[in-house]
Amino acid sequence: MVNSRLSAAIETLKHNGVRMTPQRHAILNFLFSTMSHPTADEIYKALESNFPNMSVATVYNNLRLFKEAGLVRELTYGDASSRFDANMTEHYHVICKQCGKITDFDYPPLLAVEEEASNRTGYMVDSHRMELYGICPECQRKMEYKN
Ligand SMILES: [Zn+2]
Ligand SMILES: [Zn+2]
């Protein structure tokens, strides 16, 4: 699964004129094998022991390349650093208020909301962003232990 996505991604990058390097390969592989929606910094920390010459800026530049090629999505949160999501299917996110974990939630896109917003405001609405907040199962368990 990861390998076929990886080779498809390498093809896409090639079409975009992006040469594959070991670092690029490692960053892609990391993104495809994690569900954690990592920040550039987290990716850097996970890979730095294998690539001592790599910097956070390198990771960030590569993520931008991947984003331009349509391989990852950037999730921005105001001032906090962006998170990166290699799951390109339509999905929503549930976010833990305690630990900040982001979990994918498959649910049909709420197109009716976009249509209604468009009808009522006259905007040409083409996308929306919805996030759900709560306490993840791990944090719930920790809370139980404390009580
Ligand atoms: Zn949590
Ligand atoms: Zn996601």
Image (tube, rainbow, N blue to C red):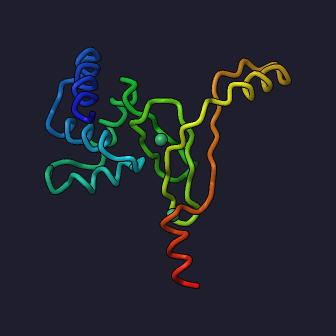
- Residue 125 vs 90, above or below: the answer is above
Q: Residue at x 24, y 28 (%)?
A: 4
* x and y percentages locating residue 88 in the rendered image: 44, 30
Q: Residue at x 42, y 42 (%)?
A: 84
- Residue 36 vs 60, above or below: the answer is below
* x and y percentages locating residue 23 in the rendered image: 18, 40
- Residue 9 vs 97, above or below: the answer is above
Q: What is the residue that sits farthest to the right in this orientation?
A: 120
Q: Is residue 97 left or right of residue 4?
A: right
Task: Give the total of numbered labels.
Answer: 0
Identify the image quadrant of the C terminus: bottom right
Q: Residue at x 63, y 26 (%)?
A: 127
Q: Is residue 7 left or right of residue 73?
A: left
Name the quadrant containing residue 16.
top left
* x and y percentages locating residue 90 in the rendered image: 52, 30
* x and y percentages locating residue 133 in the rendered image: 63, 54
Name the quadrant containing residue 32.
top left
Q: Residue at x 34, y 30 (%)?
A: 66
Identify the image quadrant of the N terminus: top left
Q: What is the residue that sits farthest to the top in this orientation?
A: 15
